[in-house]
Image (cartoon, helix red, strand yellow):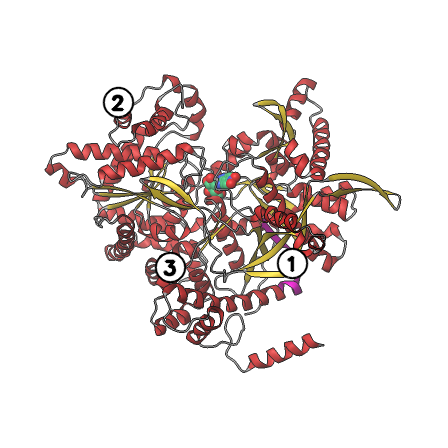
Amino acid sequence: GRRALHVAAVAEAEKTAATTRGGAASVPAPVDIANKLRYLFGRNGDYTNADAYHGTAWSVREKLIDSFNKTHEHWRKEDPKFIYYLSAEFLMGRSLTNTVYNLGLQGEYADALNQMGYEMEKVADAERDAALGNGGLGRLAACFLDSMATLDLPGWGYGIRYKYGMFKQALKNGYQIEQPDIWLTSGNPWEVRRDDVKFEVGFGGRVERRKVNGKEVTVWTPSEKVIAQAYDNPIPGFDTPTTSNLRLWDAMPLTEFDLGAFNAGDYDRAMLDRERAEAISAVLYPNDSTPEGKELRLKQQYFFVCASLQDVLSRFKAVHGTAFESLPDKACFQLNDTHPTIAVAELMRLLVDVEGLDWDQAWTITTKCLNYTNHTVMPEALEKWPVKVMAKMLPRHMEIIEVINEGWTRWLAGHLGDLKSEERAKRIAAMSIIHENPWNKEEMLVNMAYLAVVGSSAVNGVAAIHSNIVKDEILNDFYQIFPSKFQNKTNGVTPRRWLAWCNPELAALITDTLGTSEWINDTEKLAGLRAYASDKSFQAKWSAVKKAKKAKLAALIKKIHGDDVNQEALFDIQIKRIHEYKRQYLNVLSIIWRYKQLKKMSPEERRKAVPRVCVIGGKAASAYDMAKRIIRLVTAVGDVINRDPDTKDLLRLYFLPDYNVSLAETIIPAAELSQHISTAGTEASGTSNMKFQMNGCLIIGTWDGANIEIAEETGVDNVFVFGVRAEEINQLRKERKNFKTDPRWDELMRDIEGGMFGDKDYFKPLVDSVNNMKVGNDWFLLANDFAAYLEAQEEVDACYKDQAEWLRRSIMYTAGSGKFSSDRTIREYAEDIWHVKPSRPSA
Ligand code: B1H
């Protein structure tokens, strides 16, 4: 028919043209870019960098889609098992550079832009970040997609196409203000709307039992329905023909497809329905680590999970009909934290209510298909939804969870049959998926982590210490019952974006030295750098790269703050979400202490001091009052220090606003010291620590999260480790009231309280939170670690004075970073949890 004719005609035309990786006929890139600008944007010459970005991106998009199509044609033919990564967040950042480099098109497009009078770097800088995530958890999902594609693993991400991503942070008089992230207005070349892929998602309503052909069936009639519309975001692998997919759902009103509402003269209601539906995918909740129990958030979670599962089942049925017993051989799902955990109940609903399977058979399939990753140990961060809220929004799911819980607690009762009945009842109550709110006995809660554990085959933490805390503390009851379910999968980051592409100068030096660029997808090869760590001429080249990257960061500081900084100074960086447990406050206290010491010094002594440029960046959740005060403290201290003629050559402190993925790509290569100073046992992993390590940046940090494994790989003596250990924390918290604070600490508290940095009323709660036993009790033990931290900072200074030693360590960091490629992490998931195998299309 017509399709065959069309395919033949295109194939014929392509034979006569040169082909690129995707296989499309290639028009010379400058011509193509100009054509895109002419026909998509109506522009003719005299383009800005932003124009050039759009033209280039729309041109590159076509190669990307060709590669995507080839990959998916191959996968359709092969029908391999797929992994679906379900995540409420994907923090993708920019795509142009990554796509061009991953597809191996950098030469072609850099040349094209040069011919047209542009520079790739400036053009790439015009792209807005796709910031559909908060921080580490969302960026991890993005790194995982890069590795899955690079390893040719059949797998997709599934999430929400938020209209507004993470808010833009601005400073006004040193205070954080939040502005909406309007990222889609100029169009998004990196997505493809799939008008043929949409699903209905229902909410509310009622549940009935009906007899159909003598069989009792459950029918859920939602009171509200919306449409989930698919958008595909192709994910190019590096050095492979594979391009996989991130499918994001946009919420649309049903009425647009149901013209009846309009015909009935219900125009205003239809418009209100539109707003209500669009609200579901309107905005990312800007909380990192602590979920807010907002109803809309549960709606978002169910919305994307329901659409994703329907999508997967409909593709499965198209090939395998209703042979659902083989679903676990064809599909598995990774739950990125508890946010998509409603999938346990939704998969049961789809299999039992919609497909008519027996409960037990459906349960076997469901638990084989699902796996859960825990990302945090903070008790307040474990999601719990009030039964009332869930019963109203998802009445059938609430019933299903009740039935799951009945089966689970019944099974437990049998399993714990040897225990005395009192003890047994206690254990069962402690593991019940539905339980009382400990702060409000009237309220019953659904514990999503418990549901995820019971409904999954594997449960994993994200760094060795964290996985142990999951097993020994937060989910210990469950670990005792199912020890083999629990695993560790230490996080990783993609070495493409976080070393090769963001630091091409260092990448070139590494490739030159190792005589191969294979380290880009085999990072264990970086270990070869160890042989050069003490080589003077190599150190000189290494240092020259760092200097060049520092100059770029200095230029950025100049652009933002108008100040010139001493580029010989030690660049000391702490960038991450602002949180009390991450202890940016402790960093500021040490900076104030340093400032006071410098003030007291003679000119002689000052000449011996190590100059530092301190940078702090990160967003505070809009409702996180204490975090906002910490930001203001940073800016207030900076205002004093940076203007003091006695010290300004030796110490600076800058807050860099709107920290995001692309800012990280500039800051990390320039960093010499980075701070990862969370209270031991609180940071599940951290992933920026790995990015800094790859870029040869030394770490000052606590014995926490992935810092521990980084230290092991780098050599513990090369890391500035300080502070109490996780095992001591509980005891220290109990003894907190008798803790004797350091006199230097007391002095700093008096300084802040006394108004040394102005705004003393605003800073009062900050002082109280760590100093006043009645108010804050210093939960994160800043005072306990303060002295050890100052001492570690002195070690940093001493080491920096010995540049040969500093550079040796710097090289040892990169050399020891092989383990922290997300390729390694993803290989482990694929082998130990997903049982998914590579499937590569032919080039
Ligand atoms: C991490 C979160 C998180 N852990 C709730 N938990 C959220 C929790 O919007 N919410 O409700 C959002 C995010 N994020 C981070 O995950 C950990 O703090 C890091 O230590 C870890 O490196 C990262 C990736 O595993």
Q: Which residue is mark 2?
A: 743
Residue under the point 63% across and 44% down: 302
Q: Which residue type carries mark 3? A: Asp
Q: Is mark 2 within 8 Å of ligand 1?
A: no
Q: Are marks 2 and 3 in contact (CB under 8 Å)?
A: no
For residue 182, side relative to residue 530 (left or right) = right
Are dots 1 and 3 in contact, CB under 8 Å? no
Q: Is residue 448 left or right of residue 820?
A: right
Q: Which residues are magenta?
A: 74-85
> Mark 2 vs mark 1: which is more N-terminal?
1
Q: Residues within 10 Å of mark 3 (few under 14, many from 20)?
A: some
Alpha-carbon distance for marks 1 and 3?
A: 33 Å
Q: Percent position (x, y) of residue 225?
A: 68, 47
Taking depth in this image into account, of 203 and 802 the one nearest to the observer is 203
Label 1 residue SS: strand
Tell which residue pokes out farthest to the bottom in this image.
Answer: 16
Residue type at the position of mark 1: Val
Residue 80 magenta-highlighted: yes
Tell me the CA gap for discs 2 and 1. 65 Å
**Along the line of sight, which residue is nearer the eye, 813 or 449?**
449
Question: Which of the two labelled residues, at mark 1 and mark 3, occupies the earlier sequence position?
Answer: 3
* Residue at the disc numbered 1: 197
Kindly state the secondary structure of the residue where label 3 is placed. Answer: loop
Label 2's element?
Answer: helix
